[in-house]
């Protein structure tokens, strides 16, 4: 059982927006501004999309945005493209360790 | 450009040791919080351990399943980050990734089996 809770799957049509949630507790998501999101295509290594809740590494399009409210962090993907179809994982600092969510499969219909 | 390149993965028997390397370019390893994360076949991501940036003390933390068996170190001269794995178990079988706020590596596969 993962420490952070993510929906198993979300879907959207090209051009639409989707939001993936990541719910933790005050000991992780709610307690620190250190939430990250990675994208993983099948058989590939994860790619960092968001760190420190909302920051984007160089090269990540601004269609990807992160936010946090209380114990829940969110990844919003706008202007969906077919190549956004992948698994997405959230991770959070949790004091002496780091915790991940179980992952969300995004399907672009 | 930032690059993290892991190496050292192998097929080993239970109880053996292994050292994974993560060669970094584009930033200084000792100035970042560096993590090891693993992914067992068909499973999600599992945090393994980290070393804090030197300005935060450079101390290490580990997940419960590996505490006491794994250690982490940095070679400043090589700008490389290491995971020293001891007393390996079959459940340590996974792809191991080094990560930081600058990105993730491509992974190196560790298989533990008799």
Image: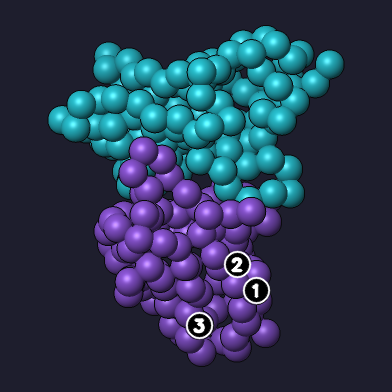
Evaluate whether label 1 is on the same chain as label 2: yes
Residue at mark 1 shares a chain with residue at mark 3: yes
Q: Which element carries disc 3, helix, strand or loop?
A: strand
Q: Nearer the viewer, residue B78 or A7?
A: A7
**Visual hue assigned to chain B:** cyan
Give me the chain that's purple.
A
On the image, numbered disc 1 is attached to which residue?
A: A9
Q: Which residue is mark 2?
A: A104
Q: CA–CA distance between discs 1 and 3? A: 11 Å
Q: Residue at x 60, y 67 (%)?
A: A104
Residues tagged 3 and 2 counted as in contact (Cβ below 8 A): no
Give the mark nearest the N terminus, 1 or 3: 1
Q: Residue at x 33, y 71 (%)?
A: A70
Subunit that carries the residue with mark 1: A
Q: Position of residue B32 (x, y in %)?
A: 26, 36
Q: Is residue A34 left or right of residue B13?
A: left
Q: Nearer the viewer, residue A91 or B81?
A: A91
Q: Please provide percent x and percent y for residue A60.
A: 38, 63
Q: Is residue A56 visible?
A: no
Q: Are marks 1 and 2 in contact (CB under 8 Å)?
A: yes
Q: Position of residue B9 (x, y in %)?
A: 62, 23
**C-alpha distance separating marks 3 and 2:** 12 Å
For this orientation, the residue located farthest to the front is A26
> Residue A18 got which mark?
3
Residue farthest to the right, as pictured: B114
Q: Between marks 1 and 2, how big is the CA–CA gap?
A: 5 Å
The 10 Å Cα crowd at callout 2, few under 14, some 14 to 19, many 20 or more, is many
Quadrant location of residue A67? bottom left
Q: Is residue B29 above or below residue B69?
A: below
Query: Which residue is at a point 35% across and 60% down the rendered structure image?
Result: A26
């Amino acid at each position: 059982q993962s420490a952070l809770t993510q929906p198993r799957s979300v879907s959207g049509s090209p051009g639409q927006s989707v939001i993936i949630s990541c719910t933790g507790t005050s000991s992780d998501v709610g307690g620190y501004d250190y939430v990250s999101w990675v994208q993983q295509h099948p058989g590939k290594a994860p790619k960092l999309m968001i760190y420190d809740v909302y920051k984007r590494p160089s090269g990540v399009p601004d269609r990807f945005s992160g936010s946090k409210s209380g114990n829940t962090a969110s990844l919003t993907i706008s202007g969906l493209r077919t190549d956004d179809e992948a698994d997405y994982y959230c991770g959070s600092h949790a004091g002496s360790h780091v915790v991940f969510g179980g992952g969300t499969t995004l399907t672009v219909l | 450009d930032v690059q993290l390149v892991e190496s050292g993965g192998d097929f080993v028997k239970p109880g053996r040791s292994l050292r994974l390397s993560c060669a970094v370019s584009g930033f200084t390893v000792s100035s970042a919080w560096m993590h090891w994360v693993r992914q067992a076949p068909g499973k999600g991501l599992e945090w393994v351990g980290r070393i804090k940036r030197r300005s935060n003390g450079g101390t290490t933390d580990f997940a419960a399943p590996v505490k006491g068996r794994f250690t982490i170190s940095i070679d400043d001269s090589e700008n490389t980050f290491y995971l020293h794995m001891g007393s390996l178990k079959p459940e340590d079988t996974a792809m191991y990734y080094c990560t930081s706020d600058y990105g993730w590596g491509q992974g190196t596969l560790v298989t533990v089996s008799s």
